[in-house]
Image (spheres, grey):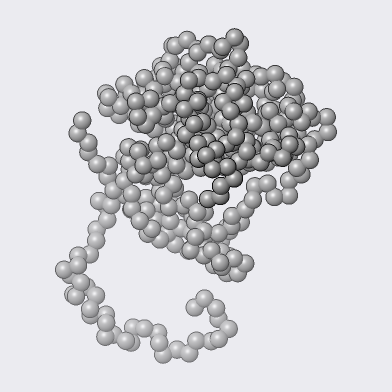
């Protein structure tokens, strides 16, 4: 019997302490519903999550390593884009 | 512990220790009164706890056999998780049985040092459904679907048990079993609606486990003598039938038409009368603990 591989899904979990879904890894599944269940078993076994997203890996458009320099290097010397010239008040947490 | 607002979670200072590994674990039995309720026979309550414990322990052992041998890595982890949930239920129930019995037997003594005729599990959980020549993934899923649907129906009623410990164990188990049932139902649909081959295996899998279906609903003397403590399984038959029929309809499967496996002189799993597979299962499960008595690992 020939065997074809299941499609790849990327998994995003929002933890109890987290504000947003964070990419935690990927998995194979026959369809999105099973991907969600597999994600529950693989990535939230230790009580980490309150919400899961799964996305077919094929739906993600990624930047290419070859374009790294034109994409990211120009930001490297624009120090004025960082708010480093403000004094941070001591009594403001989580800044 | 849960937070409606993510900002609350961030500023919760109480438990930074396990930040990376999940937080908010709790003990399902904390604060539960462990005294045996008045008027309840300790012998019957012990026997009933063993019935529920052995069902979970033996199926856990069977599911563990799939470890590293499931069709896909993700499914391997899923089956192992389900096995661990059941093992957790078994441990709580065995501990309760030992404590009510009052002869100083702990969960390990009850799991590893009892012989086959002292095990009170239904025969459905002990048969060999694979991996290997005893079965395959579809039979394993068929058994899990039938078992978890039945046990969920029992546990949903057991939540109202007069024994507070059983009620607390049931409350914890209901959430786990609901997931097990969902997992098995999802796979039943996919195998039945997949290829010609997968459908054939699913049909054969259901037919394989079905002879052990009736035994699940035979109310035992012990269950009868514990009114308001035990759940008579005959009470849940209609509900289990209905749930399974829903899955069969969705999967376009027919309810198997096979004769029930007979009891031996009126006795079956709940009386300690098991199938041939049980001895082999216990030999593997108990071998290490019996070879090295008192060993710690």
Q: Position of residue B205 (x, y in %)?
A: 39, 22
- The picture quadrant where one finds residue B247 is top left
Task: Looking at this view, name the residue that lies furthest to the right.
Answer: B38
Numbered circles on residues, count: 0
Q: Position of residue B252 (x, y in %)?
A: 38, 21
Q: Residue at x 50, y 25 (%)?
A: B278
B266 lies above or below B37: above
| Left or right of residue A91, residue A82 in this image | left
| Residue B245 appearing in the image | no
Q: Closest to the observer: B162 or B126?
A: B126
Q: Closest to the observer: B262 or B248?
A: B262
- The picture quadrant where one finds residue B186 is top left
Q: Closest to the observer: A61 or A10?
A: A10
| Left or right of residue B173, residue B126 in this image | left
Q: Residue at x 47, y 27 (%)?
A: B280
Q: Residue at x 27, y 56 (%)?
A: A60
B7 lies above or below A69: above
């Amino acid at each position: 019997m020939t065997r074809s591989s299941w499609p790849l899904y990327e998994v995003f979990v929002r933890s109890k302490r987290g504000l947003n879904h964070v990419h935690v890894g990927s998995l194979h599944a026959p369809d999105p519903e099973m991907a969600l269940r597999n994600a529950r078993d693989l990535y939230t076994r230790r009580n980490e999550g309150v919400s899961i997203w799964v996305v077919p890996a094929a739906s993600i458009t990624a930047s290419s390593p070859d374009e790294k320099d034109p994409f990211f290097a120009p930001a490297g010397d624009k120090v004025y884009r960082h708010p480093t010239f403000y004094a941070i008040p001591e009594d403001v947490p989580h800044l | 512990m849960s937070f409606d607002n993510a900002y609350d979670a961030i500023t919760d200072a109480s438990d930074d220790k396990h930040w990376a590994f999940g937080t908010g674990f709790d003990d399902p039995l904390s604060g539960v009164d462990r005294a045996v309720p008045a008027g309840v026979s300790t012998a019957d309550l012990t026997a009933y706890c063993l019935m529920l414990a052995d069902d979970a322990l033996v199926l856990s052992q069977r599911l563990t056999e799939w470890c590293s041998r499931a069709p896909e890595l993700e499914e391997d982890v899923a089956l192992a998780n389900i096995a661990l949930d059941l093992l957790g239920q078994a441990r709580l129930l065995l501990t309760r049985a030992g404590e009510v019995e009052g002869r100083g037997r702990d969960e390990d003594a009850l799991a590893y040092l009892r012989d086959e005729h002292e095990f009170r599990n239904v025969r459905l959980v002990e048969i060999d459904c694979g991996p290997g020549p005893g079965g395959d993934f579809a039979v394993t899923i068929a058994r899990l679907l039938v078992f978890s649907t039945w046990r969920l129906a029992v546990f949903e009623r057991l939540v109202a048990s007069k024994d507070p410990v059983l009620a607390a164990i049931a409350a914890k188990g209901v959430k786990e079993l609901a997931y097990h049932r969902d997992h098995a139902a999802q796979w039943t649909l996919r195998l039945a609606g997949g290829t010609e081959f997968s459908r054939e295996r699913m049909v054969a899998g259901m037919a394989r486990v079905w002879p052990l279906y009736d035994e699940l609903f035979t109310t035992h003397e012990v269950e009868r003598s514990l009114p308001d403590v035990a759940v008579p399984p005959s009470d849940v038959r209609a509900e289990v039938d209905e749930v399974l029929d829903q899955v069969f309809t969705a999967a376009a499967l027919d309810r198997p038409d096979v004769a029930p496996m007979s009891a031996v002189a009126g006795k079956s799993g709940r009386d300690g009368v098991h199938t041939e597979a049980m001895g082999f299962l216990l030999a593997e499960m108990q071998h290490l603990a019996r070879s090295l008595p008192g060993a710690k690992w």
